[in-house]
Amino acid sequence: MDQGAAMKFKGILPGRARGRALVFRDPISFQGEIDEEGKVVAKGNPHAGESVAGKILLYPEAKGSSGGCMMLRLLAKRGKKPAAIINTRHLDPNLVEGAILADIPMLCFPQGDPYEFVSSGDLVEVDGEAGLLIKVA
Amino acid sequence: MRLTDQELRLLNGEEGEIKALAMSYLVKLGNAFDGEEMVDILYAHMSSGSALREGEIDYLEELADKGSRVVVPTSSEVIPVDLLNPEAIAAPPELVKEHMRLLSIQRRMGIASTYTCVPFTQGYVPPAGSYIASMETAAIIYFNSVLGARTNRCGYFVLYAALTGKYPKIGYLLDENRKGTHLVSVEARLRDSTDYGAVGFYVGSLVGSGVPVFTGLSQPRQEQLMQLGAALATSGTVAMYHVPGITPEAPTVESAFKGNRIQATITVTRKEIQETLARLQTAKGATVDFVFLGCPQYTVEQIRHAAGLLEGRRVHADTTLWIGTNRMALAMAERMGYADVITEAGGVLICDTCPMLSFLRLDALEKRGVTGPAYRTMLTDSVKQAKYAQTTIGCEIIVDRVEQCIEAAINGRWEG
């Protein structure tokens, strides 16, 4: 692994993943704002039209209907799941359930400002066990 | 996590592989939230499984075939079709067939086929302080805030909780996470459920996952609190609010915060309510081809009120009117004659389903080779339905109170 700069989080669900970061500054919902193919369909969202598949998602917290859990499960079945999920402000049990079923590593509660640390498109790695977000040089 | 001998037996597969898998998921969830122990739950409200999402019904059938049964009273969530009267809403027959299959699977597993988002209106009223596991954000927030039962924002894991009777003691099951975080002073006089929805939507967008404490609400009705909660959980992740004097664990504002710092004070006047409703409106014209009432599902009293507004009148030929409810309220509405009044006026009293989860979803239509939305403009009295229907069924939206919705259904136009 190319070791770059790393930021420490609390590791929520174990697992390792590598992918491009997709950073949202506002809460997102897996029901209604992301479609069954993993495309962002929320109107007015800066990432509308982009896919979450294989991405390392970073956003403050989950919001919206509890159907989000089932959506992650479905995305996993279709091979469209995000590679990892990082929440920065709050950990929603419903989302964690979905991530357990979809086998997605998760981090939360950063030590520092992750929005300064990482931008959409950066190649990053997540270590769910160690609680690390690593920039791949 | 510290597990009891009984929980370890479940986890080690001594009561079968399904319960072992269920326990392993629940333990993972508990560990993710630093849970220290499991609790016994009294009740579960679970996702029914939808034929619109591949594999869900098959998965339940697999569990039923292996002899799995729920071990606590368990109700179930809204489905994509009305199974009692599918013709009235032109529900696709193949979906109806799949959900008839689900019905028999649920029966074998001991799950009540309630198909509701408001099980507490149908006899599922867990006592204050009891631990439960519920999905459906509109139900979760009502259980926590109005009844004082304790549930997290559960999703699919309600199934595993229902199969084992266990849930990790985390999140809103713990006192510390139920304390108030924001003080909300409602200065406007709230007239109806739609006003409560607007307040909820406005506050939810400001507090995120906080626990708002409301002052200034004067004796809200059950239906108004349902609307407030549904809206708070739509624009935010709110799972718990306090109305001092109503929320069982908070007789006063002080006890709602229990020593927590007030993070912010929010004032709601008529201006914020009007601005919120206006912001939700995406429709440009006044022509309305779809009027939907009943999100959350209408209670018997709300059906009575809507029937009174429709009595002796006729829904416009180019407009569809659905009023959503559940099997129990429907049975009562039929006995009281409200259902006949609605049908004679050309409206449809629907059961089991609601637009945003139904076969009207764009993704469901697409699978059947239909492109574009089924309706152009939806008028509804619910901010939750308004918000979700925009993206899921792809229509333009207007939100207004029930009286205006019924007038528009009759005129085919909204006179806002």
Image: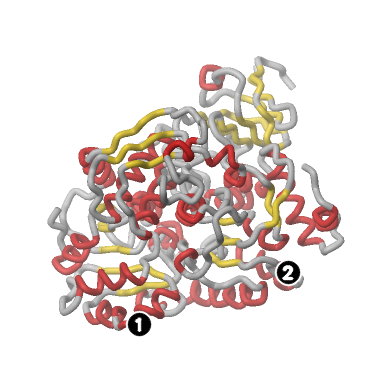
- Asked where in the image residue B279 lies, by quadrant, the reply is top left
- Three-letter amino acid code at disc 2? Ser
The subunit letter for the residue under badge 1 reads: B
Q: Residue at x 58, y 34 (%)?
A: A55
Q: Please name whichever residue, B27 or B414, is drawn nearer the observer in this view of the structure.
A: B27
Q: Mark on residue B68? A: 2
- Asked where in the image residue B19 lies, by quadrant, the reply is bottom right
Q: Is residue B96 above or below residue B355?
A: below
Residue A69 seen anywhere in this rendered image of the structure = no
- Residue B155: x and y in percent read 58, 53
Q: Secondary structure at mark 1?
A: helix
Which residue does the numbered mark 1 point to in the structure image? Answer: B334
Q: Secondary structure at mark 2?
A: loop
Q: Is residue B392 above or below residue B79?
A: above
Do the CB atoms of the residues marked 1 and 2 lie less than 8 Å apart?
Answer: no
Q: Residue at x 23, y 43 (%)?
A: B188
Mark closer to the observer (1, 2): 1
Q: Residue at x 23, y 63 (%)?
A: B289
Both marks 1 and 2 on one chain: yes
Q: Earlier in the sequence, mark 1 or mark 2?
A: 2
Binning the other alpha carbons within 10 Å of mark 2 as few (below 14), some (14 to 19) or many (20 upward) gives some
- Asked where in the image residue A113 lies, by quadrant, the reply is top right
Q: Please name whichever residue, B382 or B262, is drawn nearer the observer in this view of the structure.
A: B262
Residue B38 seen anywhere in this rendered image of the structure = yes
- Residue B405: x and y in percent read 22, 61
Q: Is residue B208 above or below residue B139?
A: above
The subunit letter for the residue under badge 2 reads: B
